[in-house]
Every structure is written in C-alpha cells, then in structure tokens.
Amino acid sequence: MRVLLSAYACEPNRGSEPEVGWQRAMSMLAFADEVWVLTRSNNRPVIEADPLSYSPGLHFIYYDLPAWALKLKRRAWFAHIYFVLWQRGAYREAAKWHRDSPFDCVYHVTFAGMKFGSFMGKLGIPFVIGPVAGGERAPFRLRRRLPIRGQAAELLRDLGILIQRFNLLSRSTFAAADRIYVTTAESLKLIPRKWHFKTAVHLAVATNIRAGQNIERQLPDYPRFVYAGRLIYWKGAHLAIRALAEVRAMNPSATLTLIGDGPAEEWLRSVVEQCGVANAVEFAGRIPREQLIEAFSHYTALVFPSLHDSGGMVVLEALSQGTPVVCLDLGGPGFIVNASCGFAAPTAGADEHCTVTRIANAMNFLATMTDDQSAQFSHHAIARANELSWVSLTRTMARHIDLV
C-alpha cells in the first residue's frame, strides 16, 4: 500500500512540529509498503543528512512556493496566506504524482490547526487529518495576573477560536475527511456535530519507544526543579516561580531552572524578584534538544504548568527519562500525566493562588520522596512514555484506513 503524508513541517531532531512530521513518517513505515512525504523544499538538507531518510520504502517529495511568496512569508500579515497557498500548491503537486502512480490514502499530519485547512481530500482517496489543535483556552481565573499584553493576546486567541467555527476552508476539509483526529476535548467542540461520528480525540505528540529504556536517574542532593519551553505568558512559567516560593518555606534549598527563551523573560525576572527567589532561580537560556533530554534525569521533576498546550512534547521527553512531571489538568499535558508519573493540578474553579498552592504541594511531595518512591515514579514515568509512543499513535490512525 502506498501512503502519502502531507507534512509541511518535517525535520529530524528539531523538536516541536518538525519532529511530529518526521516521526509520523518513520512510524508509518511499519504499516505501509511505501510512505511518500510531501514537505517543504527548505527541509531537504536536514532530511537528507539523516541516514534514516534513506530507509527502504520511504520517499520524499519537495515543494515550495515561488521566491516572491517566500520573501513575503517573513511578514507576519502574510504568514497565514502563505500557508494556505502552500497547501493549495501541495495538493496540485500531489495530484501530479497521484496521476502517474496512484496513492492508496493520504494523511495531513502537520500544521493541522483549526484555522488551516487541507486540499488533500480532493485527491479522491481515503483522507485522514489531524490530530487537529486550536480549541484550547486558558481559564479566565488564571489570566488575571498576566501582564496587559498577555491578557490581550489571550482575548485575541478567544476571538480567533470563535471565528474558527465559521471557517469555510476548515469546514470543507472536515467534510472531505474520512477520519478526523483532534488533540483535546476542547478542540472537539469546534468540529460541527454532524461530523463527530468520524472524529476522535488523540494526542498529536508521542515518544520514540526506544528512548525510554534503561534510564539511570542521577537524583540531585537537594530539590532541583526545571521548566523547559518558550518563555511566553501562556506557558505558565510564572506559576512555577510562584510555586517555588511556597516550596522554599518547607525546603529552603529547592531551586528552579528555566530552560528556554522568549519575550516574557523580562517579566518573569520581575516575578522572580517579587517572590524573593532570585538566588534560587536560574535562567539557563535555550540549549540543544539532545542536551535538554539528557538533563532531565538530573532534576527532581519537570514543572510545566502551561495554560493551553495542545501537545506537550517536553512532558513526554521528561517522562521518557524517568522524570516526574507537575502540570495543570489542561490540554495535552493534562492527558499525558497521571497519578503514577506525576501530578496534574486541578484547575476547575481555582484561582491563581489556589493553583500555585496545588503545584507547590506536588513539588513538595516529590522533593521529600523516599528512594523507593522515587524509583516507582521513575518506573511509571518511563512506562507512561512508552505507552504513548509514535508506533502506538500511528497504529491507531492506520487502523481506520485498513493498514493494520
């Protein structure tokens, strides 16, 4: 069987959306005779530098828009238009290949957001899209202490989510799809009810099952917590900082390392000063992904209280190293983390003070675990990561196109 993947983003070892495209291609090889990946031309050097790109049965089709469009892509106002144009051109490119040697089915796998559609349903073969994200929202009670800029951005996001209900491009895509996957129950609400019968909730991210084996944790001598991700308002790093201030009342040696960079860094530094924990918080900046994953095993836990993350790849990466996770019961992280491998702090009806205290209580528990408890958490963290593997995700999606 010949399978086509529409993967605008597809690069090995880059993390985030490019990693999704790459891993979906790699894992699909177990279920199809040939896997053809339609992706951007600028991804070619990175793809061809990886030996796995020459795996038997794996093929790449490279396509990009003309130079004038690539130039305009740098302007924020054109980014959305560019992506729609790329999808239109990618369909035409796919149609040419399909005429010469037909594909049996097609999957739209990256940048499958609510505001972006796909034209691949026009190929006239079984068509699967997703997992689609975009319906997740930050609870209003947890926005009140954000800076004005952050609150405004969330309100604009709310408006965008509302508008998506009337997005004709997305609606035509969902109508053409044989199967739709969404990342969370919140995103499911944006799919018209008449198409719920062919829609299911499934994570958009996963782990490589080989990464979670034979991990030896090197526990720190004192409670060391880590946040990893972009330093932007809705990622919740400020909640981790405020929770650390409460933790240090019981564990004065506890520290927090913030790995990443972003526009909220200056504000987060002011939060650190307000909380009186300047001597306990380190801004480590961005580090290579491989170094980050290796570093997880040296920390007590990852604290990742994101307000509306549809995926949460960093959560899976931490679990794969046997590191417990503290997050909120929202979005992808709230689904990934269960009581065996960490804590997902309840947010229903909770204000920021209550939420911070719940995060701090979880951090305190992890900081005072016995060696046996720590070993159990690590064991279950790795088991959870392996349970949510790329092979498992792909098998689920392949089942509905009779590939398994």
Image: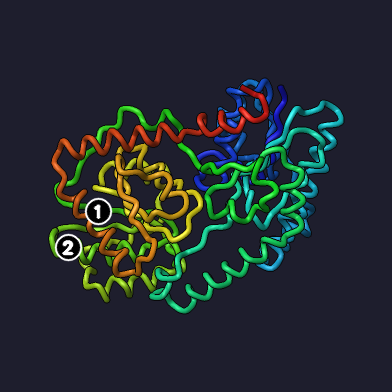
Across and down, in percent, residue 24 comes to 58, 35
Quadrant of the drawing holding the N terminus: top right
Between the C-alphas of marks 2 and 1, the distance is 13 Å
Mark 1 crowd level (few <14, some 14–19, many ≥20, 10 Å Cα)? many
Mark 2 and 1 residues: CB-CB less than 8 Å, in contact? no
Q: How is the image coloured?
A: rainbow
Quadrant of the drawing holding the C terminus: top right
Front-lying residue, 158 or 47: 158
Identify the mark at residue 362; answer none if there is no mark: 1
Q: Which residue is mark 2?
A: 248
Residue at figure coordinates x 25%, y 53% from the top left: 362
Front-lying residue, 350 or 381: 350
Residue at figure coordinates x 67%, y 66% from the top left: 163
Across and down, in percent, residue 93 comes to 81, 40
Mark 2 crowd level (few <14, some 14–19, many ≥20, 10 Å Cα)? some
Q: Residue furthest bottom?
A: 148
Among the two numbered marks 2 and 1 on one chain, the one whose residue lies closer to the N terminus: 2
| Position of residue 30 in the picture relative to residue 42 (left or right) | left
